[in-house]
Image (cartoon, rainbow, N blue to C red):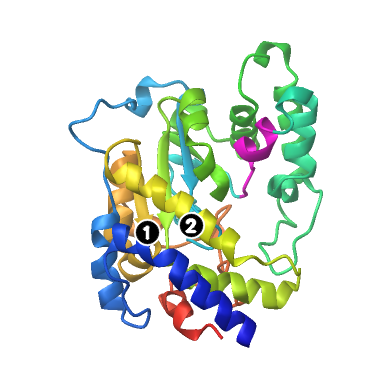
C-alpha cells in the first residue's frame, strides 16, 4: 500500500507542470464535468493557416491513405480503434503492429523476411496469424488466421511488390481476406501507442498520413499501470517510465496544438464523457461521415468489443467509469 502511495506522489510531482501547460489546473477525477471542460480545448484541429501535407483520400493511392494512432498505453488508443472499426470508409487493423518501433527500427536492416516474421510471429499482431491465443482478450477463434498469413506472405514476397511498404501490404492482405475493395477504403488505420516516438519517420514514409494522438490525465494513467502491475506481478514497474512516456505524448500534443504537426489530439476524458462531440471531430478530420450508430459503438473485427480495462472490467458500451480510476488507486 505504501509503495503505491509513493508512486502516486512521485507521479504528482513529475506530472504537475506539463499537465498544467496542456490542460490547466488538474480537475478532481470524480468531477466529470470539470474533466470535460478542462480537456475540451485539447482537441486541436490542424491549423488552418499552415501548409497542409494531406490531400483528399480519393487523390491518393491506397499505399498513402494512412492513418496512425499514437499515445500512451492505457490512454484510449484501443478505444479509438474500436470506435472506428465498423466505419465502412475505413480499414482498421485490429492489433498493434509496432511497425515503426520494432519492425523497421530493429528488423529493417535484416531484410524483408525478418520483418515479415516479426510482424506475424512476435508483434502483438501475431494473434491474427495464429501464433498466440490471448486470455481475457478478444476471441479470434473464428478469424481466418491461416488465410491472412498466406495472403500476406504472397503479397510481401511478390516481386511486383518489392518496392512497396510491408505495412501497406499487410493492410492490403487484411482487406483481401474480407473482400473489401481497396478503392472503397478512404483511410487504413494502424494503432501502436509507441508511434508517438516516430512521428517524423511516419510522415517521411507516409507524407499524407492522418495522425490521432490520445491523451489522458497522468494520475489515471498511473493508476491503470498500478492495476496492471498488481495483476501481472512482473516486478518491472517503473513510475518514471510511465511519466516519461506521458511527457513524450504531452510534447507531441503540444506540437499538434501549435500547428507544428498535422493531427488531432483526443483527450480520453472528453472521449468517454462526450463521445458524440469528440467522434464528430475525429470523423471530420478523417473526412468520413459521422454515423452515431457506428462510431459510438465499439467493435473489433465487426464484433462487440468488451473493453481493455486494466482492472479487468468488461463493458458493452463507452463507459465513464475509467475517468475516476485515479481517485480509486491505492
**199 and 157: which one is in front?**
199
What residue sits right under mark 1 in the picture? 18
What residue sits right under mark 2 in the picture? 246
Where is the N terminus found, in terms of image quarters? bottom right
- Quarter-of-image position of residue 50: top left
Q: Say if 104 sits above or below 276 in the image.
A: above
CB within 8 Å, label 2 to label 1: yes
Task: Please tell me how crowded label 2 is: few (under 14), some (14-19), or many (20+) other residues with Cα within 10 Å.
Answer: many
Q: Say if 48 sits above or below 290 in the image.
A: above
Q: Earlier in the sequence, mark 2 or mark 1?
A: 1
Magenta stretch: includes residue 163: no
User: From mark 2 to mark 1, how far is it between C-alphas?
Assistant: 9 Å
Q: Is residue 150 visible?
A: no
Of labels 2 and 1, the one closer to you: 1
Q: Position of residue 281 (x, y in %)?
A: 28, 50
Identify the residue shown where x is 33% and y is 55%. Answer: 279
Q: Is residue 165 visible?
A: yes
SS assignment at label 2: helix
Which range of residues does the magenta coloring cover? 95-105
- Quarter-of-image position of residue 100: top right
Amino acid at each position: 500500500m505504501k509503495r503505491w502511495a509513493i508512486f502516486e506522489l512521485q507521479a504528482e510531482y513529475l506530472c504537475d507542470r506539463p499537465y498544467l501547460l496542456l490542460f490547466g489546473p488538474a480537475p478532481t477525477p470524480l468531477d466529470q464535468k470539470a474533466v470535460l471542460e478542462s480537456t475540451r480545448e485539447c482537441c486541436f484541429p490542424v491549423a488552418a493557416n499552415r501548409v497542409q501535407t494531406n490531400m483528399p483520400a480519393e487523390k491518393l493511392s491506397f499505399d498513402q491513405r494512412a492513418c496512425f494512432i499514437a499515445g500512451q498505453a492505457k490512454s484510449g488508443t484501443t478505444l479509438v480503434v474500436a470506435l472506428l472499426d465498423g466505419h465502412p470508409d475505413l480499414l482498421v487493423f485490429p492489433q498493434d503492429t509496432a511497425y515503426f518501433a520494432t519492425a523497421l527500427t530493429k528488423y529493417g536492416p535484416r531484410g524483408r523476411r525478418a520483418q515479415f516474421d516479426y510482424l506475424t510471429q512476435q508483434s502483438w499482431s501475431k494473434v491474427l496469424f495464429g501464433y498466440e491465443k490471448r486470455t481475457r482478450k478478444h476471441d479470434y477463434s473464428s478469424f481466418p488466421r491461416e488465410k491472412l498469413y498466406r495472403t500476406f506472405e504472397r503479397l510481401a514476397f511478390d516481386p511486383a511488390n518489392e518496392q512497396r511498404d510491408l505495412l501497406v501490404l499487410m493492410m492490403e492482405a487484411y482487406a483481401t481476406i474480407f473482400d473489401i475493395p481497396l478503392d472503397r477504403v478512404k483511410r487504413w488505420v494502424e494503432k501502436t501507442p509507441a508511434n508517438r516516438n516516430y512521428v517524423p519517420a511516419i510522415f517521411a514514409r507516409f507524407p499524407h498520413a492522418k495522425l490521432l494522438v490520445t491523451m489522458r490525465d497522468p494520475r489515471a494513467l498511473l493508476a491503470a499501470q498500478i492495476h496492471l502491475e498488481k495483476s501481472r506481478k512482473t516486478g518491472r514497474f517503473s513510475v518514471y517510465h510511465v511519466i516519461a512516456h506521458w511527457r513524450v505524448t504531452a510534447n507531441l500534443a503540444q506540437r499538434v496544438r501549435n500547428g507544428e504537426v498535422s493531427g488531432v489530439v483526443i483527450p480520453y476524458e472528453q472521449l468517454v464523457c462526450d463521445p458524440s462531440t469528440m467522434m464528430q471531430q475525429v470523423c471530420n478530420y478523417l473526412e468520413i461521415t459521422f454515423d452515431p450508430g457506428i462510431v459510438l459503438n465499439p467493435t473489433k473485427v465487426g464484433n462487440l468489443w468488451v473493453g481493455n480495462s486494466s482492472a479487468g472490467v468488461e463493458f458493452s458500451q463507452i463507459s465513464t467509469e475509467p475517468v475516476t480510476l485515479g481517485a480509486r488507486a491505492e
